[in-house]
Every structure is written in C-alpha cells, then in structure tokens.
Image (tube, rainbow, N blue to C red):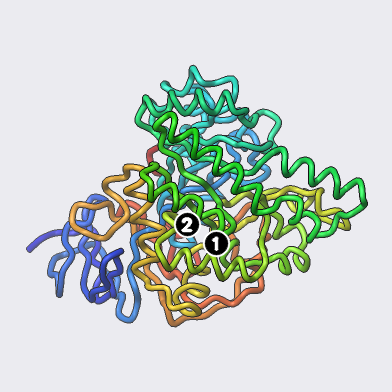
Amino acid sequence: MATYDLIIKNGKIVTAETIVQGDIAIKDGKIIEVGQSLQGSPARVIDAEGLHIFPGLIDTHVHFNEPGRTEWEGLETGSRSLAAGGVTTFFDMPLNSTPPTINKENLDLKKACANEKAIVNPRYWGGLVPENIENLKELHENGVIGFKAFMSPSGIADFNHVDDETIFKGMKEIASLGSLLAVHAESTVICDQLAEEKQKQGKTTARDFVESRPIISEIEAVRRIISYAEATGCKVHIVHASSRKVVEVIQAAKDRGVDITVETCPHYLALTVKDLEEKGGLAKCCPPLRDEDEVEDLWVAVANGEINVIGSDHSPAPASMKTITDNYFEGWGGISGAQSTLNILLTEGYFKRSLPLERIVALTATNPAKLFGLDSKGTIAEGYDADLAIVNLEESFELKTEDLFYRHQHSPYVGMTFKGNVKSTIVNGEVVFENGEIIAPQKVNA
C-alpha cells in the first residue's frame, strides 16, 4: 500500500478544463495521484466532502515593501494574508522596497527576507528604470519572473519612470533575454496636465481625481507600448487595465500577432467611483476606479477570454497615508486586497454573473503559470506542486477588520458580504491556513 503525507478525499477538483469528484494524494510537496477512492497510509486525511479544491492562486502583482518599507506591509504579514485567501504563490513588485529590485544585490536582499518570512511561494519582478539597463541580464539570470516599468511616475522617489528612449532600449534588451516587460500604462502628459488644471480650479473631489486619469490616458500609453513591442519583438504584459476599452486595443494587437497579454484586478470588477466617494482613500488607486457601466463591460471581457490574468495589485500603506479629507489628489494610491481576490471572483463572478469556476482557475492559476513559465504550478494533476485551496462555495461571510492578516487592517472590502470561503490553503503539501487561522509558520525557498 502506498505511503503518502496527505490525502484529500471526496472533493470537487476544479481545473481550467473540468470539475470532477475525487481524491488527491500528496507526498514530498508533490501531487502523486489524482483519482477515485485512493488508498494509502497517509499521515493525514482531509475530508473535502461538499467542498471544492482549486489550484492555489498565483497572485502576479503584489507590493510587500520589504526590505526597507516594512512599516507599510512586509513579507510575513503579506504572505499570511495571501494564504488566508487561497493564494500559494506571489510575484513581488520591485519598486516599494528600499532599495528597489533593480540589480542583483538588491534582489538578493529581497530573497533573503522572503526565505526568512514568507509562508507561500515567492517570485520576484525586476525593475526597468533609466539607470539600470545594464543590470537587466544579471537580474534575469538570477531568476526574476520578468521586468516592470512605469510609463508615468510611480510615486516612489527611488524608482523612476521610463522615458520613451529608455523603455525602447530596455525592451530590446529584455527581448534578447527571452523575458517580458510588465507595464504600468498611463500617459504622464495627459494625467499631469489634467491634474494640474483640476487643482488650479479647486476641483479636488473623487470624481475630479478620476477624470484627471481618464481611460484615454491608458489607451494612449498602451498604443505606444504596442508600437515599441512590434519594433523590438519584446513580450509585453499590461497590468491593471481598468476598462474594456483598454483591453480592446490590446486584443486588436493580439489579433495581428503582437506578443502581448493583459491583467486586470478585483477592484476594477467589484468597486466603482461611488465607492471611492464613500470609502475615501481606502479605495484610491491608479488607474482609478471607473463607473458601473465600465465594471460591467470589464466583466464581459473576462467572460469572453479577453483578459489573461487577474492579480490583486495589493498596494498597502499605513492608514495615515490613506486618509483623504477634501482633496483626492492627496493620499497614497493603492488598494489593500490580496486576501480577497478569490472571494470577489466567486461572489461577483461565479454567483452573480455565472462565470464558470474553470475560467476563474484559468485566470488566477493556469494562465499565470503558463505565461511566466511555472511549469509545476497552476493545475491539479500528477507531478504538479501540491499548492491547493479548499473552498466552501456555500458558506457566506461578512469581511471584518479583524479577519485581515495585513500589517494594517484596512481594506475597501471590509463590510462586504462574500459567498465562497477559503477553508484550507496548502503550500508545497503543507497546510498553512485552516479554518481562519495560520497554522504552520512554514518557510519556503525562493
């Protein structure tokens, strides 16, 4: 009789292709067998009768701010919040750390922090900034998942946005490495000029802030980066598209053979400008939230397969930096949401709009794994990493402040009622989250 570390029995196993009832046998961090009525002598059995088993989510877009800005978040609290949301792998962005991840030395510092503190699997973005093109190769050789550039100011003084010459040269280098470039695509000229006009006129409401960063500013930047991609052959990934109008420009480029993908975020699928008006700084982000008709159109893009990936863009900050009184141009632009991605997709997508569970798996696990070359992740099958989320789809709950594992317990999702609750999260075969509690201080290797 086979010996396993863990067997999960009687669950509904969800992949990007199908949902089947069955068991999962795990040993040494790997899925050894998937089938019916598996027999063995495991150290532990989890009965998942009535529950769904998802591949662990891969959050391609988080800002954990360590080293250097741990007072904003941190790898320990950040990774715990991910585990509570069924996420088993994250890609940490390069800009909020001090120093930023723009060379091998700084990457090594971040890896050391993650090795010590993260309880889910870490991966790392490298930065593309005007001063580091010569460092891109060493970052690639030391395992960055790709590179991130801002076409408009990042809000971080030591992570400069790229001018057109820098981004073109950087894309040529990234293409030669066989890597890809993720882009924050907003037009500096459009946003800066509109923001200046608004503030000179004393127009500083939530609506004024949103109007200063219009959808056309994203479209202009995306069109520009597409032309550079066509000229350099560089793979491009557009992050946090806030509107289907942006996605349509990207889809047209895909149709003519440009190697480009697009990500959106849960907040663009669950929140609107009205939420920004009501919740203040907790709901401020860049690009900003849009109106309800844009939210519905974006869900159409999700349903039609026009979106490749959904990442949280978890961008936390202390409450003092999120406080807005009467000027929405002030205050940090970033939403704390890493713990709630699956909850939002289930509640707003599966239950409200009949989005198939298989599509949710594709967007949050299978597609990211394929896109970023994580060959052993993203699905539930023999030989794959035992990264799993066990979910009770019938359980509803109201998100409360005390439920959050973030360093700063605030989020625009607090007070919302979700249907579909993560009961257990398994990372490399180890249960790290169960029934609302972190139960294993597991450390993973970078």
Toward the viewer: 72 or 443? 72
* Secondary structure at numbered mark 2: strand
Residue under pointer 2: 310
* Label 1 Cα crowd, 10 Å radius (few <14 / some 14-19 / many 20+): many
* Residue 4 versus residue 91 in the image, above or below: below
Does the rendering let one see residue 119? no
Within the image, what quadrant is residue 42 found in?
Answer: bottom left
Toward the viewer: 246 or 359? 246
The amino acid sitting under disc 1 is Pro
* Cα separation between marks 2 and 1: 7 Å
| Residue occupying the point 53% across, 38% down | 225
* Residue 387 versus residue 148 in the image, above or below: below
> What is the residue that sits farthest to the top in this orientation?
134
| 189 horizontally vs 421: left or right | right
| Residue occupying the point 34% across, 65% down | 54
| 133 horizontally vs 380: left or right | right
Does the rendering let one see residue 188? yes
- Residue 274: x %, y % from top left: 73, 69
- Residue 251: x %, y % from top left: 44, 53
The amino acid sitting under disc 2 is Ile
> What is the residue that sits farthest to the left in this orientation?
1
| Residue occupying the point 21% across, 59% down | 381
- Residue 294: x %, y % from top left: 61, 66
Q: Tell me if label 2 and label 1 are in contact, CB under 8 Å.
A: yes
| Residue occupying the point 75% across, 65% down | 279
- Residue 8: x %, y % from top left: 26, 68
| Residue 379, disc | none
Q: Earlier in the sequence, mark 2 or mark 1?
A: 1
Q: Quadrant of the N terminus?
A: bottom left
| Residue 266, disc | 1
